[in-house]
Amino acid sequence: MAELLNGLEDFVVPYLDDIAIFSDTWESHIKHMETVLQRIKRAKLTIKPSKCKFAQQNVKFLGHIVGQGFRTPSEIKVQAVLEFPTPRTKTQIRAFLGIAGYYQKYINLFSVIAAPLTDALKGRAKKGEIKWTTECENAFRELKGKLIDKPVLYAPNFEREFIVQTDASNAGMGAVLTQLTEQGEEHPILYLSKKFSEVEKRYCTTEKECASIVFAIKRLHYYLDGNSFLVMTDHNPLVWLNRNVSSNPRLMRWALALQPYNFRIVHRSGKSHKNADSLSRSVIDN
């Protein structure tokens, strides 16, 4: 299907035998649909009308509800996560992390929250029962709770400045990519997180906070490369990061690694440095 629709990436997303067509206006949507249908016709393929939806404001696609500039998890898929029974084996934990992890971009600090579950998978044995601790139960319930809140992610606008908010704790690091609307509202585009390795856990506070910035910018390369963007941190010593002012070799190495990027870094106090989690609530109901 990808080969059939090659060259139409600006308005088509194929996946196996599914096709999503998106457009800015009704007029362009008609033209886009005609282009896609002509290609299908020339390939002598057929489509089943009962499985097609045309001219929709929102569509269910690959486990997401997508449209009007935002996306949210499909209710059916979320229900599967909510109804997942308490895992008793490593296989069951992997299964839960698999379906919950599909939506990790909606969940702030997913990897940190899930750390007790991933820790339970340690050991040589890939199967067998595990010790279900209070920490495991809390992580299991919290991940479910995050999806109950109906999180929403917004589509990126490459004509607006991106904002990267980062934070680190003893357990791991997290980041959220956001943008401001014309009304000054901050909307989340995606969340990132990573559990610290045993070596990273021994970093000092400044190194952990800096590692979270490097992690976020590298992971968001395709959004940030070639664009001017803002980095927000609640760790004031890092405002020098893009000026290469440090006697710490590790921090200097990271600062140099970020030189190709065009960004400015500002400090936001911990009280004000709240990620866009409160903004990532369902606006569909409104």
Image (cartoon, rainbow, N blue to C red):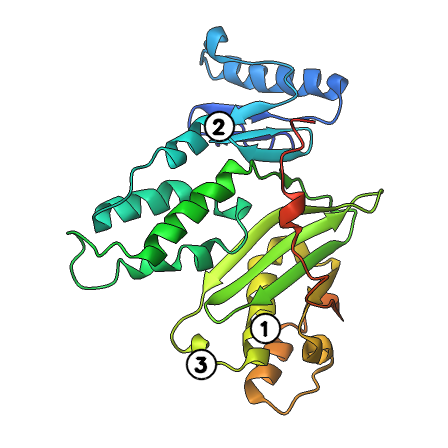
Which residue in the protein does label 2 denote? 75
Q: Who's the residue at 55% across and 72% down the image?
A: 211
Q: Who's the residue at 65% across and 28% down the image?
A: 284
Image x and y of residue 60, in percent: 52, 24
- Using the image, tell me which numbered label, if any, was put on residue 157: none
**Mark 2–mark 1 CB contact (< 8 Å):** no
Please name whichever residue, 104 or 27, is drawn nearer the observer in this view of the structure.
104
Image x and y of residue 286, in percent: 70, 27
Image x and y of residue 136, in percent: 33, 54
SS at circle 3: helix
Which residue in the protein does label 1 denote? 209
Q: Amino acid at mark 2?
A: Glu
At label 1, counting other C-alpha atoms closer than 10 Å, the crowd grade (few under 14, some 14-19, many 20 or more) is many
Marks 1/3: CA–CA distance: 13 Å
Q: Is residue 102 visible?
A: no
Q: Amino acid at mark 1?
A: Glu
